[in-house]
Structures are given as structure tokens and as C-alpha cells.
Image: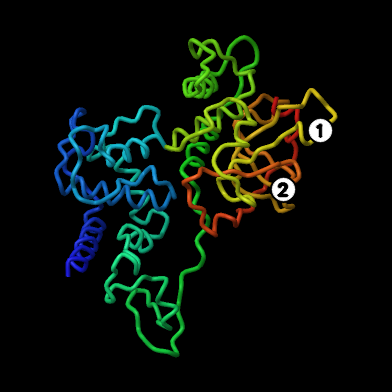
Amino acid sequence: MGIQNLNLDRIVAVGTGFLSGFAIAAPVGDRARGAQNDQADVRTVQLLLEFAARKAKTRAFDPKGVDGLIARNAAKSSTVKAIIAFQRSFMRNPDGLVEPDGATIRRLRAMADGAEGRARDAARAVMKVPGPADGKPAWLPAAENLAARGAHVTMTGKPKAGPTAQATLPPPATPVKPAWIGVAEEELATGVQEIKGSKHNARIQEYHWATDQLSKKKKFKSADDMTDERPWCASFVGWTLEQAGYESAESSGSQSYRRWGRKVDRPCVGCVAVINYGKLYPKDPKKKGKGHVGFIVGQTPEGYLVMLGGNQRNKTGGRVCYVAYRKGLIEMFRMPKDFEITPDMYNLPVMKIAKGGASFADSR
């Protein structure tokens, strides 16, 4: 009976959230920054974070429970940590605070309120219905089990039993982009590019500086010591992953990503693609230990893989941009160890990207 009540409470909370627009009355999060943490408000934020974690497919956004409680010590609060991780996906200086009319609550709502036409899917995901191993009651069947029972799913979601009925399932969803791709796309939108001459792009210097601070062998005293002429593809990848709450290779060397995370057997949306020029051109000593890294986001109609990365197209000024690469140029594909790849992520979207800009010189 306790499990049934738990699930009823969850359903009521989700339903109330959709009806109220997931509104909160007072700030939620780090008490030291003024959060009041009313229990109802905290539950609302936790539900939204839980759904964001599922949609973005990252554990970093997961508050690890919807109990309406936040530890007084922010450093020990899973909810505050989740808020900060989520904020890193769109702001430079996360504060661990969700305010009633702030950017954080607006972005969380946008992921759950059906802004992309999937409010019903959002509700199901936020409910986080337990599986059979968790003691799921028989009266609350999982959606994926309805087809196996020969049930018909109507638009209202009510099952109509019958051995001859056919299951009506929604069409396959487009691949959900991992959180770090959203961060990379924001950098693309701002037009990050090298500055010719003695001046340097402060944003690229920030990529380098953040990477250097994570490294055990810190080489620089300040960001001003770094130039945007220094190869920055790995610094961009590392900065982007860290902004999304994932551990990077903590190195500005592209080949460090050959040992980072876990290897995947084929390209998927969001994976890190590693190019090793030393392996491609073993007879050229100048290319030994040099390479390139970026994120796979799609493919061209001709079958080239589209990489979103930094320090690309250097003949026209290294920048954050899309480039189409032959599959044979890429040595391996990697993903964070704790990231769960779903089958739809292997369905790379088709993108019309001009060829070129995929040579050794274009990533130097």
C-alpha cells in the first residue's frame, strides 16, 4: 500500500505541476544565497531537474530524489549540485539558486511544459514510474509493456485490453542531444573565432585557462599568458564537457581523449571523435602526437560525419563551426563513462555541410 501511495503522490505532484506551470513562490537552492526552500517549491524544482536529467541524458542534473528537502550545507545537497550542473549548461557563473522568475526556472519549465510538443512524454518521464523490480503495482503498467500485452493505447493514455487489439505507439523521437552539445551550440551561435595579430579572443583564452586549471601540471599563471593561435580543439571540448557537468580529459592535448571515457563502436550524437594524424601519416614525423577532437552531431547526405568543434577551418581563421569529415579520418569515438546511450542517438540527423576544412592544416 505504501508503494501505491508513493506513486499516487508522484502523479498528483506532476499533474499539479503541469496545471500550475511549475511555479514556485520563493527561491530554491543554496540557503547562503537567500533560498527559502519551501517544501512544495523544492519538490517542484526537484521534479523539473529529474525530468531534465532524463531528457538531457545526464546524471549531473538528477537531484537524487523528490522529497522537498535541501541540506543546509549546500556542498552536501544533491539538489543544489544538480541546480549548479544545470545552470552550467547555459550560464558562466552558476549560483545554485532557482528564483521564481529567473532564467533557471524558465529553462527547466521549457524542457517539461511541452515547448517541443511533447507534454505527454514529459509527464511520463517526470513520473519516473518504478519498474517491476522496484515493486511497481499492477494497476500502474509501464507504457513499454502495453504493446506486449496486446493493448491499444488511445490518445488519452487509457489502455483498452484485448488480445486482437494493436498497439498504437508514437513515432520514433529524434535523437536527444546530450547537454554538452547545447553548450557547444551556444558557443557556435556567438561566433567564437581567432583574432589575427597580437590580440587574442578572450573566450578561447578561457577555454585554455579552464583546462589548465584542471590539469595537474599547470603551465600558466593567468589566462593572459595564453594565445588563441595555440591549438585549442581539446580545450574547447574539455571546457564544454565541464560546463555540462561531465569530467573532461583535463588536457589541452587532443590525443588525451584516446584514453578518456569509454570507447563506442560507432558514431552517435554527442560522441567525441578523435583524429590521430600520426596514425594516418606514419611516415611523417611532424604529425606524430598531433590530432584533432570534436563532437559528432550528424552526417551529410554523402555519408560524411559532421563534427562540431573548435579550432576548425584555420585557413579562414580557426573558429567554432561544423565541418564534414570522412569516416576514415577518425580513429575512434568516445563517450563519458556514466552516460547511457539510447538507440535513437545512433540515428545521425542529415545535415547539409560544405566539404572542406578537414585537413591537418585546418586544425593547427
Residue 61 is tagged as none
Which amino acid type corresponds to the residue marked 1 in the rendered image?
Answer: Tyr
Residue 103, image x and y in percent?
32, 37
Q: Which residue is mark 2?
A: 304
Q: Describe residue 151's horizontal placement relative to residue 268 as left or right.
A: left
Residue 171, image x and y in percent?
50, 68
Residue 154, image x and y in percent?
37, 77
Look at 61% across and 18% down and name the residue there. 195
Q: Which residue is mark 1?
A: 281
Q: Residues within 10 Å of mark 1 (few under 14, many from 20)?
A: few
Secondary element type, mark 1: loop
Which amino acid type corresponds to the residue marked 2 in the rendered image?
Answer: Tyr
For the residues marked 2 and 1, what is the alpha-carbon distance in whole angstroms?
A: 20 Å
Query: Is 17 in front, or is 360?
Result: 360
Look at 25% across and 39% down and name the residue there. 101
Of the numbered discs 2 and 1, the one sitting upstream in the chain is: 1
Residue 217, image x and y in percent?
53, 18
Task: Please tell me whether residue 308 is drawn above or below residue 11 in the rendered image.
Answer: above
Task: Please tell me whether residue 273 is drawn above or below residue 95 in the rendered image.
Answer: below
Secondary element type, mark 2: loop
Q: Quadrant of the N terminus?
A: bottom left
Query: Is 183 in front, or is 286?
Result: 286
Q: Describe residue 41's horizontal placement relative to residue 312 as left or right.
A: left
